Image (cartoon, rainbow, N blue to C red):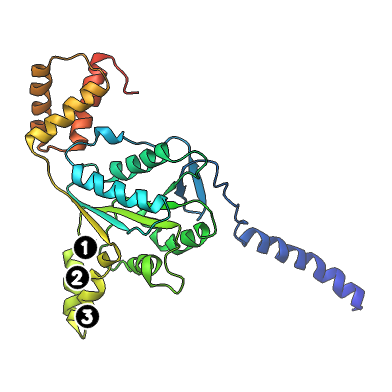
């Protein structure tokens, strides 16, 4: 067989191999347009996806959480001005406005920013993508904007070790957290880890104390802890009246109070989420929109 014949035989095979490799290769990363929006999602393909309309509640409607509201707003305001600020963990009762507060603070600070100042950006990373947090930090590091990275309902169970990526991204890497990035998380747990997860580490480790310390130290990466607790009946009713006034719902105060209390009783819970769900139901019955 001549050399030319050998090449003719191999060429189609090499072309098929090259085509297969091109299909198997990951797609080229598309650089995000950081000016496309003030809020983004960090998608499963590890790229920023613009969010043009954020699902948020106005700051003035977040009642019953005044201390947490003011503390987070002050911390974020300092960060927006280029001053030192802390990562924040918002923990506690469900439906009390933890994630709503993060989004409301972001909008409020951008609305008050000085003329010509760059807007602060908000990017949400899902709990399932937390291992990609170092990639997100690297993407944001060279950008001139200041970024709040937000993870809602953050917690870790069972044999999940992705919390180590979070620890490294927040404090532990050689480069550390970028100066233009702040991390906010919400959770129902103060220490982010299930009790059985910590107990399992305690029972199987050579040094139980060090094992537990390894787990609990995750929360120490957050310099600011803000607790959210179940609201009282008066606080719940204050939320209801604030929403009804904001959306100009035509209902008598006594009737509004009675219906709101019945709504909470049938659900066995009083919270900001319960209050807004009642207002949605009431507005629908009255033929009103919540714009």
Q: Is residue 230 left or right of residue 184?
A: left
Instruction: Name above or below for residue 239 compared with residue 92.
Output: above
Decide which of tag 1 and tag 2 comes sooner along the chain: 1
> Element type at marker 1?
loop
| Spatial separation of the CA atoms under disc 1 and disc 3 | 16 Å
For label 2, the crowd category at 10 Å Cα-Cα, with few meaning under 14, some 14 to 19 and many 20 or more, is some
Q: Nearer the viewer, residue 165 or 91?
A: 91
Q: Position of residue 31 (x, y in %)?
A: 60, 52
Decide which of tag 2 and tag 3 comes sooner along the chain: 2
Which residue appears at 14% of the width and 30% of the height? 238
> Element type at marker 3?
helix
Residue ID for mark 2: 198
Do tag 2 and tag 3 residues touch (Cβ < 8 Å)? no
Q: Quadrant of residue 155?
A: bottom left
For label 1, the crowd category at 10 Å Cα-Cα, with few meaning under 14, some 14 to 19 and many 20 or more, is some
Which residue appears at 12% of the width and 35% of the height? 235
Residue 210, numbered label: 3
Which residue appears at 24% of the width and 61% of the height? 192
Q: Is residue 208 left or right of residue 82?
A: left
The quarter of the picture where the C terminus appears is: top left
Q: Is residue 123 left or right of residue 256?
A: right
Q: Nearer the viewer, residue 121 or 48?
A: 121
Which residue appears at 47% of the width and 53% of the height? 44
Residue ID for mark 1: 191
Residue 257, numbered label: none
Q: Position of residue 201 (x, y in %)?
A: 21, 75
Outermost residue, bottom side: 206
């Amino acid at each position: 067989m001549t050399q030319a014949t050998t090449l003719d035989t191999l060429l189609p095979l090499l072309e098929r191999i090259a085509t297969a490799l091109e299909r198997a290769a990951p797609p080229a990363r598309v650089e995000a347009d950081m000016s496309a929006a003030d809020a983004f999602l960090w998608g499963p393909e590890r790229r920023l996806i613009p969010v043009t309309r954020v699902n948020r509640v106005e700051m003035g409607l977040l009642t019953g959480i005044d201390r947490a509201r003011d503390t987070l707003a002050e911390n974020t305001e300092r960060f927006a001005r280029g001053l030192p600020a802390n990562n924040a963990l918002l923990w506690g009762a469900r439906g009390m406005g933890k994630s709503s507060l993060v989004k409301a603070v972001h909008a409020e600070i951008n609305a008050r920013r000085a003329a010509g100042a760059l807007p602060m950006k908000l990017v949400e990373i899902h709990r399932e993508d937390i291992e990609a947090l170092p990639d997100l930090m690297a993407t944001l590091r060279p950008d001139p904007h200041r970024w709040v990275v937000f993870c809602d309902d953050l917690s870790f169970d069972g044999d999940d070790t992705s919390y180590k990526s979070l620890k490294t991204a927040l404090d532990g890497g050689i480069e550390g957290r970028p100066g233009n990035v702040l991390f906010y998380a919400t959770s129902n747990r103060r220490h982010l880890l299930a009790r059985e997860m910590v107990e399992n580490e305690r029972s199987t480790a050579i040094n139980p104390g060090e094992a537990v310390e390894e787990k609990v130290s995750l929360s120490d990466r957050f310099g600011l802890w803000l607790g959210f607790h179940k609201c009282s009946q008066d606080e719940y009713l204050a939320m209801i009246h604030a929403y009804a006034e904001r959306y100009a719902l035509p209902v008598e105060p006594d009737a509004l109070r009675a219906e709101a209390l019945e709504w909470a009783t049938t659900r066995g819970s009083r919270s900001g989420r319960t209050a807004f769900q009642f207002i949605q139901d009431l507005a629908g019955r009255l033929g009103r929109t919540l714009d």
